Image (tube, rainbow, N blue to C red):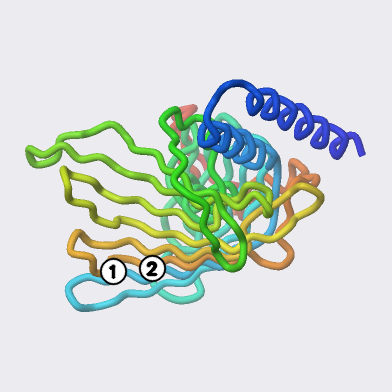
Amino acid sequence: MTCLLNRRTTWCVSLLAFFAIAVSPISADEGLVQLVKTGCSLTYSGIKSGRGSVRVTVSKIAGGSESNSESKITVAFRGDRLRVSSDTIRGPRAAYEGSFDGVNTVEWIKDSKLPATVRAGASGMIKGEFDLFADPRAHGMADLDKASDLKFLSKEILDEDECLCVESVTPAVTVDGKDVRSRLKFWVSTAQGFTIPKFQVWSVSGADETLVREETTKVRSYGENLWGPAAVSRIDYNPDGTVKKRVSVVYGPEFQLNVPVGDDTLEVKLPPGIKVVDTVNDMEYVIP
């Protein structure tokens, strides 16, 4: 109950702040941008913990051939702490166990002769598996409050839902002697908790624009004023417009957000006989 009251209080304070801005002498577009920033930031930061399974399918296309992999990722997180277990269903991806306790990372490739490792910081596969696929904040939402150059474009209908379309353009970087910028385009659904059902990345060089990535997300309610992804489809493109990679992410029906996650759920249980290389303490040992 306290958590719900805090969430409601946060939303009320933030909306009051927006209305205070809205009555000041700024344009309607600036008011919509501020609304998007506030709403998206609250949605993103409102996720504190979660647990459940995610089914990930990756198809890579290169040289006229296609390689496919499918895995089930079981994840639990609370604040900075994280545990990931990945089991291969088909393809070359390795079965994996990893955890991050807020300071160090423990990783182990299951069914291999490689030792488990202990490293400082959140690194290695655990960041890739979680950040790219399993983290519910990675799909269908973004902390747009940090986008200082956010610009309102239009209102558009996606799947019978009116969205606010905004964009952000990154500073130029030099690539092969040309100035290249990234144009990030977001469709924001106010009716579904300021989630982002569609997202595009464009590469811009002069008058030329190339679509680099497109991601669409189906969201679902995880509780009162709590929204998150249900299914994600992402396509990466080559510079010539052909498909480079397809990624499908489906969150299991048992996936939950902002639920109690115990310490034991966040720890990797290495089996007896596994060798461990601990680079933090500069030592090696075997699990008894």
| Residue occupying the point 32% across, 69% down | 60
**Tag 2–tag 1 contact (CB < 8 Å):** yes
| Residue occupying the point 49% across, 63% down | 95
Work out how far the residue at label 2 is from the one at label 1, CA to CA, in angstroms: 8 Å
Residue type pointed to by label 2: Arg
In this picture, residue 55 sits left or right of residue 61: right
**Residue 219 visible in the snapshot:** yes
Q: Nearer the viewer, residue 5 or 157?
A: 157
Q: Where is residue 40 drawn, in percent x and y?
A: 60, 40
Pick the quarter of the image with the N terminus: top right
Q: Nearer the viewer, residue 237 or 186?
A: 186
Q: Which residue is mark 2?
A: 246
Q: Nearer the viewer, residue 263 or 175?
A: 175
Image quadrant in which you'd find residue 100: top right
Label 1: element kind? strand
Q: Which residue is mark 1?
A: 243
Q: Where is residue 207 drawn, in percent x and y?
A: 17, 47
Q: Where is residue 253 drawn, in percent x and y?
A: 71, 67
Image quadrant in which you'd find residue 81: top right
Residue type pointed to by label 1: Val
| Residue occupying the point 18% across, 51% down | 208
